[in-house]
Amino acid sequence: MESSLNRRHFIKVLGLGAASLAVPGCTSLSELSAGKSSAKKPNFIIIFCDDLGYGDLSCFGHPTIRTPCVDRMAAEGQRWTNFYVGASVCTPSRAALLTGRLPIRSGMCSDKRRVLFPDSAGGLPESEVTIAEALKTGGYTTACVGKWHLGHLKPYLPTSNGFDSYFGIPYSNDMDRVGGPGRQAFFEPKTEYWNVPLMQNEDITERPADQNTITKRYTEQAVTFISQNKNKPFFLYLAHNLPHVPLFVSKDFRDKSLRGLYGDVVQEIDHGVGRILDTLRREGLAENTFVVFTSDNGPWLTFDQHGGSAGLLREGKGCTFEGGMREPCVMWWPGRIKPGVVNDMGATMDLYTTILTLAGVKVPTDRIVDGLDLSPALFGTGSSPRKTMFYYRGAKLYAARKGPYKAHFFTKPAYGKGQEKRHEPPLLYHLGHDPSEKYDISKDHPEVIQDIHKEVALHLANLIPGQDQLAKRITEK
């Protein structure tokens, strides 16, 4: 049974008190490594992109986007090929990452509104315990940089959810639109078309935010935070609001990529990753810092060349096919995790449990936590404990995966007026043989469908949906 235990009480109860080739812009590990840090507790950094597709990194197969820093990060660390998010759109996906729970449990998903908007009255419930809040009980300093999208009102901001500081925009960069020539505004974007606020902690410091320089400024904030907190354990959540449309890039990266503007944007993010890893090396923190790079959901395909690519995966953002919820993921921890390619399943929710466990902080036991500890796969002592994945669209379960098999009970186009379609028997795909979900094998494997139905029944038997946080608007009485 899930409890509404107040997060402040939770903190009180836990009460611990308060070598690869060199590439341009990415200094090699051998050149910069300053040895192990003396810190006893590991540091943690999550770099979370917005709408980056499974196929948008060169280390995941893109032929014209150059991502040398993430590529080298993958060569020195682990590239996870079966890594999932908790939803195929922004708000619920971010809630899953930070709480370790499917968003249906916290009410951070809805069949009425898919994400939070500037007129939304809700946000992440106070009863939820974020990674930041839990780590604070272990003496960690915490910072959120970038897109939040879990509630823009004061009770829901990062500083109310365990983060000591915040610098970023409170929701998507295409919201607060005030001008521009229709849909064409997204293809020829100007900062003044979107009156998006840039916030420092709880105050708006710039409006509209200069999105041309925002990726650069996020990186600078991250580097500064690392340097200022190098002598104590820290958690940095860097959530880029790009390559979500509208696309913006600083002048140093404009017209540099063979992939056009979208490629320019991704390559600037990649450069920022290089700066962050270089900072860790220079400060002697590399071997004591666990860094994860991934994205919140798949590419926004309805924006044509301004959207990304899911590679060989089917569809993209907004739907429960693989392209919507299976993301590129790179994990890096020099001298601690064994480099290689991990084909086991993992999910952003697992980062919650893994990080808390590595930090020596208790995982909440008063509620169901969906995240699992990925340590066996990380450290080469065993396989990932994740064997199943549940795919929700809003508050409805659309599909489920067990092992290599995935069953679709319902399908619906990501966007537009397409109708929901129920499948009986469910569509069934073997994701090892058919990652593009082209060949339905349901008629050949009724026993697999039966087994997945059992897993779904067990899941639903213990499910208590949270109160819908996305539907209510500020204008409502």
Image (cartoon, grey):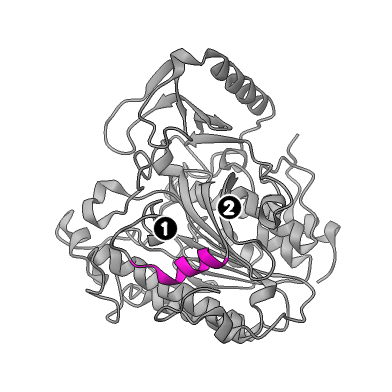
Q: Earlier in the sequence, mark 1 or mark 2?
A: 1
Seen from the viewer's position, the closer of residues 175 and 444 is 444
The answer to the question of whether label 1 and label 2 lie on touching residues, with beta carbons closer than 8 A, is no
The relative height of residue 216 versus residue 128 in the rendered view (above or below) is: below
The relative height of residue 352 versus residue 72 in the rendered view (above or below) is: above
Mark 1 lies on a secondary structure that is loop
- Locate residue 403: give its quadrant: top right
Seen from the viewer's position, the closer of residues 458 and 467 is 458
The numbered mark at residue 50 is 1
In percent of the image, x 72 and y 80: which residue is there? 36
Instruction: Tell me if I can see residue 217 in this picture.
Output: yes
Q: In which quarter of the image is the N terminus?
A: top right
Counting from the top left corner in percent of width and height, residue 94 is at: 53, 53
Left or right: 181, with 414 as reference point: left
Left or right: 263, with 405 as reference point: left
Mark 2 lies on a secondary structure that is helix
Residue 71 among those drawn in magenta = yes
Counting from the top left corner in percent of width and height, residue 97 is at: 58, 52
Counting from the top left corner in percent of width and height, residue 135 is at: 73, 64
Other-residue count near label 2 (Cα within 10 Å), few / some / many at <14 / 14–19 / ≥20: many
- Region in magenta: 66-76
Residue at numbered disc 2: 97
The number of numbered discs placed on residues in the rendered structure image is: 2
